[in-house]
Image: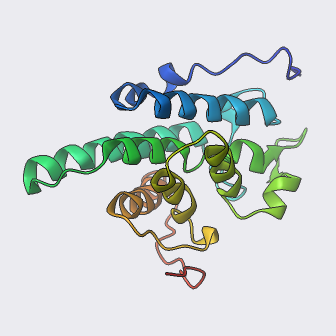
Amino acid sequence: MTTRAEQEKLDVEALFPELALLRDPQLRIAVVQIWQELWSLSDYDRLIDVPVSVKIDYPQLKHARGVVASAVAVADVWEREHDIKLDRDVLIAGALLIDVSKLVETRRDADGRIGYTELGRALPHATYAAHAALNRGVRMDVVHCILSHSPNGGKAPQTVEAQILDWLDQADISAFGFHIWARKVTHYQP
């Protein structure tokens, strides 16, 4: 098993080429730093081993890439077809960060079973990612995307970018065979 000191840093730019589309260089740096920080705190040796959830043993990396690519595609289509300009920095950074806390919310035991970490049991999903983003000075509209993409965050999406990410997150999960559209949103508050 690799120790944290031996663990290689993630090549976040190679994993997510859409980072290059961020106009704000400080936001791009913050996104990379958040991924690096949470990776350094995770119990995983390989990023491909991080699951979507304790119930969905599918690589979080593939899910994250799907959401990011879909967000860029939606922005392209809406601009071309509806002449609607989305804030691409919010959309892309939000897509890159909505599920980054899964690095520290879950772990695999020696038998490969997935469970929650202490942090994953104690905090609603995405809370730690929002905390890390705030600590890095990430814009509040991006932090809102992180917290509002899940009903566990306690807030309904209040911006079009946050709504898009909420939908795309769920749609992408359906792409690999898990249908969760019937979720309740009783925890959302305006």
Residue 29 lies, with reference to residue 110, above or below; the image says above
Q: How many marks?
A: 0
Residue 142 lies, with reference to residue 60, above or below; the image says below
Query: Which residue is most to the bottom?
Result: 186
Q: Position of residue 94 (x, y in %)?
A: 47, 48
Q: Answer with left or right where residue 56 lies relative to residue 44.
A: left
Q: Nearer the viewer, residue 36 or 109?
A: 36
Task: Residue at 59% x, 42% y: name it.
Answer: 60
Q: Position of residue 97 (x, y in %)?
A: 55, 44
Task: Residue at 55% x, 34% y: name it.
Answer: 31
The answer to whether any part of residue 44 appears in the image is no
Query: Which residue is most to the front?
Result: 137
Q: Answer with left or right where residue 18 lies relative to residue 2.
A: left
Task: Residue at 62% x, 39% y: name it.
Answer: 136
Q: Nearer the viewer, residue 149 or 86?
A: 86
Rendering colour mode: rainbow
Residue 188 lies, with reference to residue 66, above or below; the image says below
Placement of the N terminus among the 4 image quadrants: top right
Q: Answer with left or right where residue 23 lies relative to residue 83.
A: right
Task: Residue at 26% x, 49% y: name it.
Answer: 74
Q: Position of residue 81 (x, y in %)?
A: 8, 53
The answer to whether any part of residue 170 appears in the image is yes
Q: Nearer the viewer, residue 86 or 168?
A: 86
Q: Position of residue 114 (x, y in %)?
A: 79, 50
